[in-house]
Amino acid sequence: MSHKASDSLNPNQAKAVRTTEGRVLVLAGAGSGKTKVLTHRAAFLIQEKGIPPSKILGLTFTNKAAAEMRKRLSGLIGATSAEQVTLSTFHSFCLRILREDIHRLGFTDAFSIYDESDIERMVTGIAKDILGTEKQIPSLAPTMALIAKARSQGKLFLKEGMEPNWHDEFANEVLKRLGQSMRAYNALDFDSMLFFTKQLFEECPDILEKWQDRFSYVMIDEYQDTSPVQYQITELLTRKSGNLCVVGDDDQSIYGWRGAHLKNILDFQYTHRITLDQNYRSTNHILKSANALIAGNTMRHEKNLWSGFGDGDPLEVFVAPDEMMEAEAIAHRIIKLKELKGFAFRDIAILYRSNALSRIMEKALLKHMYVTPGGVKRGIPYEIVGGTEFYERREIKDLLAYLKAIVNEKDAEALLRIINYPRRGVGDESLDRITAFSRKEKLPLMELLKKTAAGEVSLDLSNQALAGVKQFLHILEDVQGKLKEGSVAQGVEFLIERIRLKAAIDLEVKSQKGQDFKWENVQEFVSSIQEFEEEHAGEESSSLLKKFVGDLSLKNNLARFEGKDSGQTDAVQLMTFHSSKGLEFKACFLMGVEDHIVPHEKSVLDVGVEEERRLLYVAITRAMRNLTISMAKERKRLGKQAVSRPSRFLFEIPKEYLKTTKWDEV
């Protein structure tokens, strides 16, 4: 590593970079330069210790973080060496392992990757099967929560060793059948990708050793967000070399609801522990407020953030009469900040605990009038971070389902999504008959469809439905034939034409604008395939299609963790506290900081309150220069106006760091 590069590190960062052997815990406070430490550490291993780049593995939680690390590493050691370092998300890494070795567990490498909605549909079908009904059933949210918890822990059963109640037994049966169905469909989802990687490592010592030998040094970013099964994979992978560096901040652990296990970072057995407490983002008034707040948590590694930016302005706090006036007051203050401090709209963020709070804020921003050099303007530009991702749009998911069905004909979820899209006469009643027969006779869906079309099985379908099934099978055969002849993009263009997708969109969507939007998305999808083919020139169409579908399914799943990039246009950024993690803004407004909102009314347990405190801590530490906290005296709850109280967390911040203003004082 060059002298110039190492000079830019503070003493604790330099220590974290140079401490390479054994189990290293780096506690990286908010804004303390953890990405810099990780990339400099990789560069140090390569340039100073002579470690081959291919022997280094860096695991992150988002594609964006992995891409940023690679970009910075390229700047330190050059693109050629940086490309040889494995930097990926946990799930991408597991996908790579499974593509090589999943056949040892009875799957093929053409497996489909299911998203949350696919799993929910499967669980609903399984629950109906267990309960012996085809009618509407009550909400399965509690069952889904239990199943998600078990799977994130790498378990096949719930509450092992305890006396189960009826619901636990029901959830266990659902979990068991879900595993059986996914195996039958040759399908995995986010959770099972991790579970089967762990299973491979535990049951196949030769595979574990192969992967252990590939990587001598493993680094993990955002370690506080790891689940029990991710912890187990990491421990197995690094058992041979013993070189594991984990970087994270227990004070920013806010994903307990999706399986993150705080104990992973709190109980990490380390040979070296280094704390990064110098913040490079915020003024000290903001940091001292955050430090005071988080000190209220008992389950944490102690650390106190500080910066060289001086005290800065105190945190502004105001209470408005109601939620509409609170939103209007925020809009006024945004224009004032722009005028007095010269901030661009993109430098400003409005953060809230729950998405439900955004509607009233959007309304206030849309109608706000303000003076500009060009005259009076109406409407402050804004964008909501975390909108619908491209690959989540229906027309794209439909096309992707066709490709999934072609790659993996066992994929029942993909088949059910498209068998009647565009409409071809296979209605809900016909689908119910088909799926009920498939479940009862344990006959794979594609096999049943083929037998039905050939007259070998009678399901008493109408002539129209039977014709629709035959047409559907012909389409899949035709597209498969086309894919063998030409490129994947040509095959997809043929599919779009064969199913008359343009006509289907025009029939479904009434407005010309909506039709154009969807059709542009379809064309963009074809372009994405062409780009993929250019990147993988020389590979045959069948393996290319398999890879495209797998990579895309994985990216699509990761999108729900990442959201979209903020600040692309000059607009105020609106987002939840959760979505704000990892971002920074010159000015932040935290709205609705009231009891029942933050802490959320459902977080009644002490552990829940601690996670809520961490969530507010994350929100506070997004602000670089200005931070405003607001609340309303009254807010509509369940359709009725109710009195609100300031969040209990506000009373944990010393008064000298706060400045109370009148809501209408601008």
Image (cartoon, helix red, strand yellow):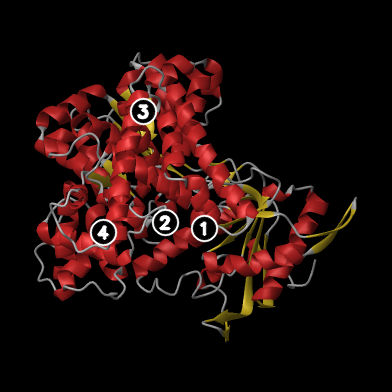
Residue at the image position 41 percent from the left and 48 percent from the top:
398
- Judging by the rendered image, the residue that carries numbered circle 4 is 122
Residue 298: percent from left, percent from top:
37, 61
Q: Is residue 303 visible?
A: no
Q: Amino acid at mark 3?
A: Thr
Graded by Cα atoms within 10 Å as few (under 14), some (14 to 19) or many (20 or more), the crowding at tag 2 reads many
Precedes in sequence: disc 2 or disc 1: 2
405 vs 137: above or below: above
196 vs 42: above or below: below
Q: Secondary structure at mark 4?
A: helix
- Judging by the rendered image, the residue that carries numbered circle 1 is 508
Mark 2–mark 3 distance (CA, rounded to whole Å): 28 Å
Question: Would you identify the image quadrant in which residue 222 lies?
Answer: top left
Mark 1–mark 4 distance (CA, rounded to whole Å): 26 Å
Precedes in sequence: disc 2 or disc 4: 4
Circles 1 and 4: CB distance less than 8 Å? no
Left or right? Give the position of 574 relative to 236: right
Q: Secondary structure at mark 2?
A: loop
